[in-house]
Image: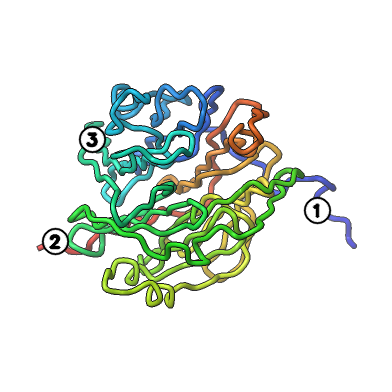
Amino acid sequence: MSGKNIPPLGGWVADSYDVVAEFDDLMPTGLTVTDEGRVFVSFPRWGDEVPYTVAEVVDGKAFPYPSRELNEWSTERSPDRLVSVQSVITDPAGHVWLLDTGSPSFQPWLENGPKVVEVDPATDQVVRTIHLEGAAVTPTTYLNDIRFDFSRGPAGFAYLTDSQPEGALIVIDLGSGESWSKLRGHHSTHATEGFRAVVQGIVRENYAVGADGIAISADGTRLYYCPLSSRRLYSVATAALIDRSLNEEEVAASVVDHGDKGASDGLESDTDGNLYATAYEHSAVLKLAADGTWSTVLHGPDVLWPDTLALAADGYLYVSVNQLPRTPLFNAGVDDRVPPYRIVRVPVDARPIRLTRSEPVR
């Protein structure tokens, strides 16, 4: 061996990152950055005292968004308010969507609780709310993450992951507001039986989470996804998801297993065909290049549970880091978290996917 440029034993290969925000008492999951550079985060109600479940980050501090009133919820208040928002995301038109599980502390969701709320950041006003019920969900559905494609259909589609153990993908027709599920219980959306994770040296056997991370291809033809309790990466044809005439077997025929990627929570993609995946067992974020090669974009001792990824127009990949394995819900009722929780970012020189119609709708 030459001995040159070899990192020391126990070293970290990509531990340089910018800290965007730190929170001492609020644990972030969802994260998005508008093309104008506004940063939004979500704080689900998982047992902590959460005064607001969605916030805008301004100068490193969190402020309730789009209003404190919409965020004020308790068991005595209407679930039409924000109950427990898991994810926030910017759509191709620049609006910010709030994905509300309607499920406080992972309990069964409340009536009218599971919903997506569209907010126009130009006015900071709610544009509309779409409730998910009926055939799209089951009594134990847990809405997790969402991606958009405005280039298909009269008004576009939204794709969501349902991360209950059996797992599913959910589609919303944004024109009609109708929603439906696909691949419910399919092996690609289902939590792996007997899944065992090792996170910062500790064996974790209590993860039974189905389809979680989600990302869309640059041309909108494939939707990538992965169960949290799995190490596989899958994709499915979006044409099969939006075609309600296809049965489950026909949809499943378009599923591709892309192989082992390690255990992941969040996924993201860019306009060059690259895919990014958190690697929560390794305190890392990985990149799968369009040519099929893997590399590490973030790896550091403080990156305990990289959760959500958000690629921004400024060429940075933003990451929420929240110490999830140390929360009471995932740690036998014991709170071992050591604040602060963080939003960090690393440069990747890439652009987010914004799938819009090339011609006006007629």
| Sooner in the amino-acid sequence: mark 2 or mark 3 | 3
The residue singled out by tag 3 in the image is 126
Which three-letter amino acid code belongs to the residue tagged 2? Val
Q: In the image, which is nearer the foreground, mark 2 or mark 3?
A: 3
Q: Position of residue 108 (x, y in %)?
A: 42, 41
**61 left or right of 22 in image:** left
Seen in the picture, residue 64 relative to 265 is either above or below; the reply is above
Which three-letter amino acid code belongs to the residue tagged 3? Val
Residues at discs 1 and 3 in contact (Cβ within 8 Å): no
Q: Secondary structure at mark 2?
A: loop
Can you name the residue that lies furthest to the left here? 362
Q: Secondary structure at mark 1?
A: loop
Residues at discs 2 and 3 in contact (Cβ within 8 Å): no
**Mark 1 vs mark 2, CA separation in Å:** 56 Å
For the C terminus, the image quarter is bottom left
**Mark 2 vs mark 3, CA separation in Å:** 23 Å
Q: In the image, which is nearer the foreground, mark 1 or mark 3?
A: 3
The residue singled out by tag 2 in the image is 361
Residue 32 visible, this orientation: no
The residue singled out by tag 1 in the image is 5
Give the residue drawn at x 43%, y 46%. Answer: 142
For the N terminus, the image quarter is bottom right
Near-viewer residue (360 or 305):
305
Q: Position of residue 131 (x, y in %)?
A: 27, 45
Near-viewer residue (288 or 64):
64
Q: Position of residue 42 (x, y in %)?
A: 43, 35
